[in-house]
Amino acid sequence: MTTPSENPTSSNFRRVPPSPGFGDPTGAGHLDGLVSTLKPEVQERLDLLTRVADLLGIDDLAFSSYASAIIRLSAREQDSRQGLNRLILVECELQNHLATTMHEERLIESWMVRLDQDLAAKESMSVIQNRREAMLKKAKEYRTLLEAISTDTPAITFETLMAQQTANEHKMHSIKEKHAQVKAFKGLPPNLALARQQLKSARAAQMELIQLRERLLGQMAASVI
């Protein structure tokens, strides 16, 4: 492409229908002569139109060609915008579907947790029920054993308690008297026959000691004389 300050060549105007004549079969020399006679601003505008024609892909520099190309571009732009809007709508629908799916997933997880808790509670209740039945069975066995070993206890009244207390006091008095009698024997057995036998043995031992003392005294006297 040429700059606005450069003179356009004949290649920039290959889409302009050639004008035959002036000794050139294609009319290129005549066209170059016409372009060279134009003012710089006109040449710049002509160059700009040529660039636009290249961009639009048209072979004719007529206004109808430009209009048709612009209409086609506008239609393509409209189609692109419609496609973009459809994509945006599809994206929104996918996001809504994703949010719904995530919500359903959270609900399923919460239901699973609740079901697990209910199952654990049911298992614990069954364990508690089994323990309760076992304890009731043991209680029945203990009750049967107690009924088997239980005896008839007499009814206790205030009069029987007072009578028993009086009898206990009499027994305590009798025991004290017997203790006093036992102390009177001074170490002898409480049986009278045994006491007499022990006393007789003690007197015999005493006589032997007296005789032994007499013999010792006699021997001492004999040794002195």
Image (cartoon, rainbow, N blue to C red):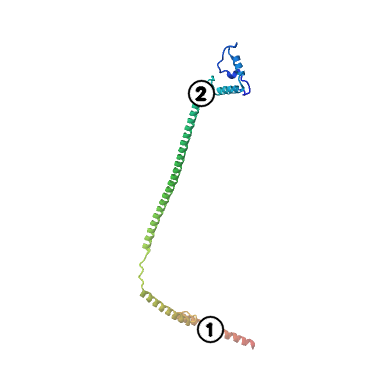
Residue 35 position by quadrant: top right
Residue positioned most to the bottom: 225
What residue sits right under mark 1 in the picture? 206
Q: Given the image, on which type of amino acid does mark 2 rest?
A: Ala
Q: Position of residue 117 (x, y in %)?
A: 44, 48
Residue at x 53%, y 82% (from the top left corner): 205
Residue positioned most to the right: 224
Residue 49 position by quadrant: top right
Label 2 sits on a secondary structure element that is: helix
Residue at x 60%, y 86% (from the top left corner): 217
What residue sits right under mark 2 in the picture? 67
* Vertical placement of residue 95 versus 57, above or below: below
Question: In the rendered view of the protein, which quadrant contains the N terminus?
Answer: top right
Say left or right for 101 vs 34: left
Frontmost of labels 2 and 1 is: 2
* Vertical placement of residue 90 versus 122, above or below: above
Q: CA distance from mark 2 to mark 1?
A: 171 Å
